[in-house]
């Protein structure tokens, strides 16, 4: 085996000579026209990569492999324990599907630059729709199936899709969720109306189609004419992925074509240490960034086999589900969220199910999406006896910011740390004023600009809001996370410094939930915060103050508030508890003391803030937290 490159050398070059470093990485991609500039910093702080270059992402992810040697290799394994299905699709078959669906979209009037919303469960057709958009230069926006119609409507309003692609239903373990009523409701709510919808009818549910607007996927695919790849600029948008910010309005993270393809392909080799032809499995959902990058684009760009898994880590049918998939499909690398491993550990603490399977193909386990707690790290590495790698990233970056890179000389692991910055990311810890902090001291985790290729160049139609990331501390990208670097240079990410929480690896905004709770006719004001949860990492809990004169039953109001969040944001929010309280703790200037409330809910020691207006309110919160199962 060839000796791995030294991290220090690779990292230093990525920061000191980004043009050389990323220029070399870009040689792995097939370009229609070579770039003029690797890094274009002519419009700081808006940096662009590979300006002047032209390519097609779908060509690189599909056609190229068929033209070379991989036509008969399996591109996608659809493994669905919830429908008892295993389906294998070769690169040639995938190319046929994608180019015909691209033809369908074109026949419905979709042209380069148009947007298409994809609201689909974990079925191969979701990938077909995504790649078909990329093929004709359309910009897709995949919306996670667990979001309620209102959230979908917000995304329709912002992305203004010409066409929407959906399926008749999703299957959540044993629940069948008809999607079409949700889609119809979202379109009704939004003022922007898509011209056409294409619906994939699944055998479990037949959706009613609206004549003139809705088309049956199978019908339109029958006579579809394949469409060719449309060349786009490296800087043209490939997709928009909405993610939670601190308010009810999600942020439309934009991803370009060129930098994205270069960075993801580089990451497969050097971060994940995986080779073309191997089986790579990201157990996530296409609706999240992990799904976009590592179920769809990165494995396909690399010529790997990717797994589309429609199931859960437990209950479909048992906690051996992941081991079954790894062993049956010879998975080399698995990537999932720590919460999935906590779920398996809870049901099978001694790894009895693990013993039933041959996991000899399994080389590395990568975890991300939330902090990997040391207990889960130790359990996974003791059970599996392979490297367990915590890596840190976010929707905005689209790929790892910090990791123990398996394709570069790795470091010894420190539990609780995602190790060190990935080449390309100049990570620093700073205070409020952007002053660098010494090792061991907690601060804001920032990345010195420019961010490497693949990261967001801006937000969709919202340069102004993008600037919030890069102007608060000039010259740096604010990740929204807090943490520190220890004396050996290891990074520790300790949690968000804003109102974003991570529930079972799903990113949600407590601000968005507060906006929903505050709409209730009886609520005067409220606070929603993340409380620690053994399985899901964090769950949101609420505290609501009622308007004067409301004398309805508190439990009933509380149930209504829980239901409102479920139906407006979605079941995925896991908002199950909301206490009714007489008052919220505030500073004298009227700011709600959410951080103190969070400490109370998590039974952590806290000091009474000197700015508090009325200290006795903390007692009210302590009582209320206890009443809903939190605090001491
Ligand atoms: N469509 C509709 N509803 C969905 C959904 C989807 N795609 N995904 C989740 N939901 C619903 C669930 O059915 C559940 O509803 P309920 O309140 O009626 O039970 C609710 O949203 C919460 O879902 P979830 O947080 O996933 O909880 P769970 O109890 O169903 O499963 C885990 C818990 C840990 C097993 C699961 O979250 C998991 O596997 N997570 C790790 C992998 C992952 O997806 N990571 C994401 C980023 S890497
Ligand atoms: P998302 O955009 O959904 O990927 O969520 C990104 C956020 O998840 C980050 O800003 C972190 O707060 C958190 N996160 C992701 N990976 C890790 C990790 N390995 N360790 C700690 N936090 C993480």
Image (tube, helix red, strand yellow):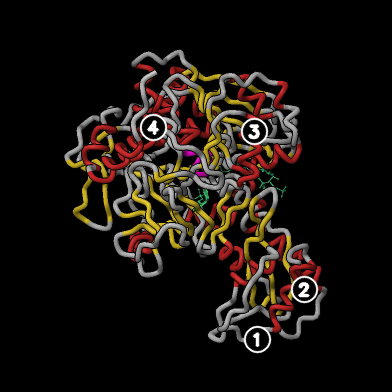
Residue 586, percent across and down?
A: 60, 81
Residue 577, picture quadrant = bottom right
Quadrant position of the N terminus in the picture: top left
**Distance (Cα) linking label 1 and label 3:** 49 Å
Give the camera-side residue of 316 and 126: 316
Q: Is residue 628 left or right of residue 588?
A: right
Q: Which residue is mark 1?
A: 614
Q: Secondary structure at mark 4?
A: loop
Q: Which mark is residue 408?
A: 4
- Say if residue 533 shows up in the picture: yes
Q: Which residue is mark 2?
A: 623
Mark 3 burial class by Cα count in 10 Å: few <14, some 14-19, many 20+: few
Q: Is residue 132 visible?
A: no
Residue tagged 3: 382
The magenta segment: 286-293
Question: Dot 4, how many residues are within 10 Å of its Cα: few (below 14), some (14-19), or many (20+)?
Answer: some
User: Circle 3 — which element?
Assistant: helix
Labels 1 & 4 near each other (Cβ < 8 A) = no
Report if the CB atoms under discs 1 and 3 are less than 8 Å apart: no
Q: CA distance from mark 4 to mark 3?
A: 24 Å
- The one of 429 and 324 positioned closer to us in this rendering: 429
Whether residue 469 is situated above or below residue 402 in the rendered picture: below
Q: Is mark 3 within 8 Å of ligand 2?
A: no
Per the model, the C-alpha gap separating discs 1 and 4 is 55 Å
Residue at (62, 78) in percent of width and height:
608
Disc 1 packing (10 Å; few <14; some 14–19; many ≥20):
few
- Dominant secondary structure of the residues highlighted in magenta in the image: helix
């Amino acid at each position: 085996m060839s000796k791995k490159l030294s991290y220090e050398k690779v990292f230093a070059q990525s920061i000191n000579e980004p043009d050389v470093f990323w220029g070399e990485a870009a040689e792995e991609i097939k370009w229609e026209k070579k770039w003029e500039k690797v890094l274009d910093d002519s419009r700081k702080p808006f940096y662009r990569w590979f300006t002047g270059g032209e390519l097609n992402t779908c060509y690189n992810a599909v056609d190229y492999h068929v033209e070379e040697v991989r036509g008969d290799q399996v591109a996608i394994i659809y493994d669905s324990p919830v429908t008892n299905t295993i389906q294998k699709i070769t690169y040639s078959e995938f190319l046929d599907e994608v180019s015909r669906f691209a033809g369908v979209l074109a026949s419905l009037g979709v042209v380069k630059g148009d947007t298409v919303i994809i609201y689909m469960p974990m079925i191969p057709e979701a990938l077909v729709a995504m790649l078909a958009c990329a093929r004709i230069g359309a910009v897709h926006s995949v919306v996670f199936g667990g979001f309620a119609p209102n959230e979908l409507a917000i995304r329709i309003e912002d992305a203004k899709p010409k066409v929407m692609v959906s399926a008749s239903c999703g299957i959540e373990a044993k629940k069948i969720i008809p999607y079409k009523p949700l889609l119809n409701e979202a379109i009704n709510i939004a003022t922007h109306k898509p011209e056409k919808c294409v619906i994939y009818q699944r055998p479990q549910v037949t959706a009613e189609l609206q004549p003139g607007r809705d088309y049956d996927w199978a019908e339109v695919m029958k006579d579809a004419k394949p469409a060719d790849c449309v060349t786009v600029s490296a800087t043209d948008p490939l997709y928009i992925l909405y993610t939670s910010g601190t308010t009810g309005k999600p942020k439309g993270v934009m991803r370009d074509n060129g930098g994205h393809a270069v960075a993801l392909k580089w990451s497969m080799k050097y971060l994940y240490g995986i080779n073309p032809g191997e089986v790579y499995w990201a157990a996530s959902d296409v609706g999240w960034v992990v799904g976009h990058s590592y179920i769809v684009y990165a494995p396909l760009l690399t010529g790997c086999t990717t797994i589309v898994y429609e199931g859960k880590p437990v209950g479909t049918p048992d906690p051996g589900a992941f081991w079954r998939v790894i062993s049956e499909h010879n998975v080399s690398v698995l990537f999932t969220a720590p919460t999935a491993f906590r779920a398996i550990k809870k049901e099978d603490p001694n790894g009895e199910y693990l013993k039933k399977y041959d996991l000899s193909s399994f080389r590395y386990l990568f975890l991300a999406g939330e902090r990997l707690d040391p207990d889960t790290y130790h359990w996974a590495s003791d059970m599996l006896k392979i490297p367990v790698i915590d890596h840190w990233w976010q929707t905005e970056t689209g790929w790892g910011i910090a990791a123990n890179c398996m394709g570069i000389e790795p470091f010894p692991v420190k539990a609780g740390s995602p190790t060190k910055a990935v080449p390309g990311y100049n990570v620093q810890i700073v205070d409020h004023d952007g002053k660098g902090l010494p090792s061991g001291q907690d601060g804001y985790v920032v990345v010195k600009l420019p961010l490497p290729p693949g990261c967001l160049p801006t937000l969709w139609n919202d340069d102004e809001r993008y600037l919030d990331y890069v102007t608060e501390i000039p010259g740096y990208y604010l990740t929204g996370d807090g943490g520190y670097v220890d004396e050996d240079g290891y990074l520790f990410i300790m949690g968000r410094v804003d109102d974003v929480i991570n529930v079972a690896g799903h990113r949600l905004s407590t601000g968005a939930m507060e906006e929903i709770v505050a709409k209730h006719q009886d609520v005067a004001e409220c606070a929603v915060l993340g409380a620690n949860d053994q399985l899901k990492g964090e769950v949101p809990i609420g505290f609501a103050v009622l308007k004067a004169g409301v004398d309805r039953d508190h439990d009933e109001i509380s149930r209504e508030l829980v239901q409102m969040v479920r139906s407006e944001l979605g079941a995925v929010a896991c908002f199950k508890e909301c206490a009714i309280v007489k008052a919220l703790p505030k500073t004298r200037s009227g700011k709600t003391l959410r951080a103190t409330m969070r400490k109370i809910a998590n039974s952590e020691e806290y000091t009474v803030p000197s700015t508090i207006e009325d200290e006795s309110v903390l007692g009210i919160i302590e009582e209320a937290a206890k009443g809903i199962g939190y605090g001491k």
